[in-house]
Amino acid sequence: MSHTLDGKGAIVTGASRGIGREIAIKLAAQGAQVAVNYPFDREAAAAEEVVNEIRAAGGIAQAVKADVRDIAQIEAMFAEAAEAFGGIDIVVSNAGGDAVVKPVVDVTEAEYDAAMALNARANFFVLRQAARTVRDGGRIVVIASSMTALCYPGSAIYGGAKAAAEHYARVLAKELGPRGVTVNAVSPGFVDTEATRAAGNVEERYEMALRQTPLGRIGEADDIADVVAFVAGSGARWITGQNLRVGGGIV
Ligand code: NAP
């Protein structure tokens, strides 16, 4: 394994499981020192497991607790990681999801606010802190979703919030370009994670995803992590302000 990210400090939000977990492991395998973010005490053991896996492979990582819906906790997480690693070069704003799937006519104010709080507002303030913190030449990645293009019935609040996050990345790319910092969105298609399975109707949803995916299989967290690691590396130095759709051709 080449260590193309040696000496880089990285933060991955929502890294105790799923796609974020694989991203943290992949960045660390390439030499980055990784802050494995998790939101609540109940996830501490899962985050420590990710850290232990990274350390066992010879990498550097530490778990950092922060609920990214809280700006003070975002700031504290960045400060802790920057101090531990001597600076931050890579930020992956991955925490998200957890939005009800419902026709617009049935969505409540509380459901709308919850979807926006995690998928739009939290992303905005993670990006703001990333912009304030990353060293020149850094990399910022926001995990959006293919749902912004698929527009399935019932996906308005989730897709709308992710569309906002995608937009923040495009604008921030222009603001940070002069510092050599790239900002991109990575939009997964359908990925097999605990969150996907917990959303119910598993058989029906997986079958539909399979039918709509030209490459003919369900995505894995690793498929997304590989692309994020590429975007975080020097090979992607000329890519900024883009939304990379990583879904086996689903959109
Ligand atoms: P997941 O398995 O639910 O993992 C999400 C991670 O984020 C968990 O570690 C979770 O911790 C953490 N998290 C949740 N709320 C948080 C908060 N307020 N602050 C900090 N961390 C928080 O989800 P996933 O399927 O890996 O999805 C990861 C990202 O990819 C999300 O942004 C999702 O919208 C996006 N995405 C996923 C798919 C898919 O098919 N899976 C497709 C497109 C886009 P807890 O366990 O404590 O909640």
Image (spheres, grey):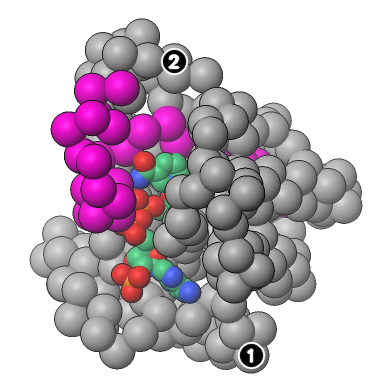
Residue under numbered circle 1: 72
Report the residue at 31% width, 22% height from top: 208
Q: CA distance from mark 1 to mark 2?
A: 39 Å
239 vs 100: above or below: above
Residue 139 falls within the magenta-colored stretch: no
Which amino acid does the dot numbered 2 rest on?
A: Gly
Nearer the N terminus, badge 1 or badge 2? 1
- Front in this rendered view, residue 249 or 153: 153
What residue do we see at 45% from left, 36% from top?
A: 188
| Amino acid under disc 1 | Ala
Would residue 63 appear left or right of 134 to someone viewing this image? left
Quadrant of res 128: bottom right
The x and y percentages for residue 103 are 55, 44
Look at the image and tell me in which quarter the N terminus lies. top left
Please say whether residue 193 is visible from this viewpoint.
no
The local secondary structure at tag 1 comes to helix
- Measuring from the top left, give residue 67's x and y in whole percent: 49, 81
Is 40 located above or below residue 7 in the figure?
A: below
Residue 59's x, y, as percent?
25, 63
Looking at the image, which residue is at 58% across and 77% down?
Answer: 69
> Disc 2 designates what residue?
249
Q: Disc 1, disc 2: CB below 8 Å?
A: no
Which structural element holds mark 2? Answer: loop
Let me know if residue 197 appears in the view.
yes
Q: Is residue 64 left or right of residue 109?
A: left
Q: Which mark is residue 192?
A: none
Q: Nearer the viewer, residue 109 or 2?
A: 109
> Over which residues does the magenta segment extend?
181-208
